[in-house]
Image: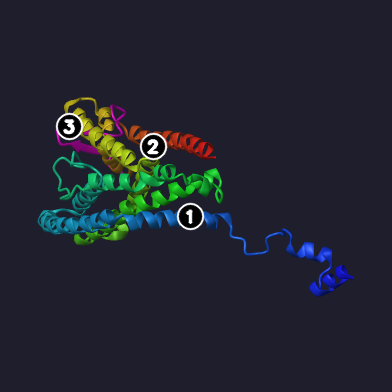
Amino acid sequence: MNEQASSSSTGDQPLDFVQKYSYRGYEGLLVPRWKRLLSYSWFELKNTWNRSTLGKILLILILALNFLSIVFATAAASFILQNATSAQKNEIIRNAVNSMVASYLTIGNVFAPSNNQFTMININLGILLIGLFAIAGSGFFADDKQGRVIEMYLTKLQRWEYAITKIVSLAVYIFLFTAGPLLGLGFIYLQAFGANHLQYLDFYTGVFIYSLIVTLLLTMSILVFSSFTDKRAYASLSFFLLYLVGSIFGMVIGLTSNNEVLWLISPAQFLSLLAYVILGDQEIYATSGSRILLNDGIGLESVHVIGLAVGIIIVATVVLAYQIYRLTNREL
C-alpha cells in the first residue's frame, strides 16, 4: 500500500524515474571545433592587445615619425623628379618605397637599392618593435607553465589545437604591427610622390608577402623561446638579446668581410635582404660601397635568403612541436 501510494504521489513509475533523472545524451547547441579554436585565439589576441600599452604607443610613434619623413621625402622628390623621365621617376620612387620597407625592422640603413639614387628618409624603430614582439609572445607558453593551466586548456582542446591557438593569436598580432604600418605608409608615400597606385600593385603584393614571411619567422622563433622556460622575462630577454647582439656583430662582420654570404649572420640585415628580394631588387649596395648582385650566380643569391627564411621556419616549427608534445605530456 505504501509503495503504491508513493508511486502514485510522484506520478512516475520506477523505470520512468530512472530514465528521467539518469545520464542522458547532450541535447543542447553544439559549437563546431573551428569556432572553439577561433574563440580561444581571439581570447589570446585580445589579452595580448590589452596588455600592449607599449605597443599602442609605438604604433602611434611610428606613424607620427614616418609622417614627418613624408614631408622631407616629398620636398626632396619634387626637386629630384622635376627633370626626370618617366622611367627614371618610376625607378626613384621604387627605390624610395622599397628602402622604407627594408629598413622597417632593422637597426640602421646598411643597404640601399641604388648607389646614387634618391632613397627614403627612414626612421628606424625596428629594434623597438622586435622588443615589443618578444615581450608580447614570450608569455604564451611560459605563463601557462608557471600557472600550471595547460591541463585546463587540454580539457577543451586537443594538443594540436592548443598549439594552433597560440600560434595564430601571436601571428595575427605581429602581422598587424608589420603589414598594417607598411601598407599604410607605402600608400601615403606613393600618394605624396603623385604615383599611380595601379602601377604599384606588385609593391603592395610584395609588402603583404614579406609581412607574412616575417610574421612566421618571428612567431615561431619567439614561441620556441617561450616553450623552454616558465619565466616570460627570460624568454623575451633571450630572444631580444640574440636579435640585438647578433645584428650588431653580424653587421660588423658583413662590413669588414668580402664574403657576401656573411651578411646573413645579422638577423636585422637578413630581414632587410629578405625585403629587397621579395620586392624584386636584385642589385643592392651596402654602406661600405660594395655592390651585391643577387642573381649573378656568385656569392650571395636570392635563393640563399629565401632558403634561410624557409629553413628557420621549418626548424622552429619542428622544435616547437616537440616542445609542445613534452609540455602537454608532462602536464598530463
Task: Residue 240 in the image: state x and y as whole percent.
Answer: 28, 39
**Color scheme of the displayed model:** rainbow
The three-letter amino acid code for the residue at tag 1 is: Tyr
Query: 10 Å neighbourhood of mark 2: few (<14), some, or many (≥20)?
Result: some
Q: Find the distance from the CA under tag 3 to the CA under tag 1.
A: 49 Å
Per the rendering, the mark at residue 229 is: 2
Q: Tag 3: Cα neighbours inside 10 Å, few (<14), some, or many (≥20)?
A: some
The stretch in magenta equals 280-300
Would residue 38 be found to the left or right of residue 134 on screen? right
Point out the tag, 2 or 3, that comes first from the N-terminus: 2
> Residue 146 — which label?
none
The residue labelled by disc 3 is 290
Between the C-alphas of marks 2 and 3, the distance is 42 Å
54 vs 107: above or below: below
Q: Tell me the distance, in whole angstroms, between the alpha carbons under discs 1 and 2.
A: 22 Å
* Residue 28 falls inside the magenta stretch: no
Residue 235 versus residue 305: which sits nearer the camera? 235
Can you see residue 331?
yes
Residue at mark 1:
40
**Residue 241, quarter of picture:** top left
| Amino acid at pointer 3 | Ser
Quadrant position of residue 245? top left
